[in-house]
Image (spheres, rainbow, N blue to C red):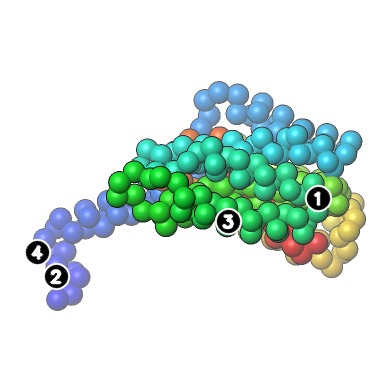
Amino acid sequence: MPWSTIATRWPCFPRFRVAERLTLDRRLAVPRPIDGPKVTLGVLWVLSLFVAARWSGDLAVVVLTPVAALAGLQTAHRWTHHEPCDRWAVALTAAVLAASALFGVVALGAAVLAGTLALVLYALALPLPRGANRIRFAELSILCALPAGLAAGSLLALARDLPEAFVGLVLLVSAYEAGDFLIGSGAGNSFEGPVAGLVMLGLVAAGLYLVLPAPFTIADLPWFAGLAAVGAPLGQFAASALLPSGEDPAPALRRLDSYLLVAPLWLLLL
């Protein structure tokens, strides 16, 4: 029987479809809360990254490790309202992943593998509530810890080894986030914010093209800027997918969300 016939005979079906769509919208929502000192905290976050890169790339560990740990902790905390998840094990793993970049990119890669294995073994050994699924427990722990730890670790590795590229990435992503927040927080739809963010990112990319910081060339800088333009908004949706609902508050994760995809990719390509 065609869908149109079913919808005509039983009009409740379209309502179910609308409800399903609204649920999906909430699942991948990118909230832009305006309560509290959001702009001030954002500016302090960016300035702290610039100061760390200017003085010493290693100094960025003081900023990035606590943020990674808090991001893992807050993400896991949101899941504890629905399923078993060890917040402190997740926070520790995320912090170790971020700090491992102090010893180089190879150490960061090894920490990702070791952290994944450690969380799986922890899920197998930990006494869980009756009926709890150990595989799901391990999966949640990995999803809460690894993205935040890898993003922060990638930023730290860039700050240590390629400080000019690190500054360029922070400028591009910060421009996107500024435009997205300033326009998107007052918009009546979900696309004005990202469009404004991409416009701001494009303007900063044009400035970087004129300055051409090392190690970029005229040929490859547009590709890296394009990667940031794609990765920053997709990272926001990825952060929403890591939470039970995109509307759940997780400020530290949102501080890293635009870097979740683009920072590891920049590190890998550079």
How many residues crowd around disc 4 within 10 Å: few (fewer than 14), some, or many (20 or more)? Answer: few
What residue sits 60% from the left and 24% below the top?
37
- Decide which of tag 1 and tag 2 comes sooner along the chain: 2
Earlier in the chain: of badge 3 and badge 1, it is 1
Q: Earlier in the sequence, mark 4 or mark 3?
A: 4
Q: Nearer the viewer, residue 195 or 132?
A: 132
Q: Which residue is mark 2?
A: 5
- Type of amino acid under label 1: Phe
Query: On the rendered image, what quadrant is the C terminus found in?
Result: bottom right
Q: Position of residue 66 (x, y in %)?
A: 66, 35
Amino acid type, mark 3: Thr
Q: Residue at x 18, y 69 (%)?
A: 4
Q: CA distance from mark 4 to mark 2?
A: 6 Å
User: Dot 1, crowdedness within 10 Å: few (<14), some or many (≥20)?
Assistant: few
Q: Is residue 23 left or right of residue 247?
A: left
Q: Name the residue: 47% across, 41% down.
A: 86
Q: Is residue 221 above or below residue 183?
A: below
Q: Compared with residue 61, is residue 212 higher up or lower down, i.e. above or below? A: below
- Element carrying mark 4: helix
Q: Quick check: 227 left or right of 182?
A: right
Q: Nearer the viewer, mark 2 or mark 3?
A: 3
Please provide percent x and percent y for residue 228. 69, 56
| Helix, strand or loop for disc 2 | helix
Does label 1 or label 4 sit earlier along the sequence?
A: 4
Q: Nearer the viewer, residue 134 or 189?
A: 134
Question: Which residue carries the number 4 mark?
Answer: 9
Query: Residue tagged by mark 3?
Result: 116
Which label belongs to residue 103? 1
Q: Is residue 170 above or below residue 221?
A: above
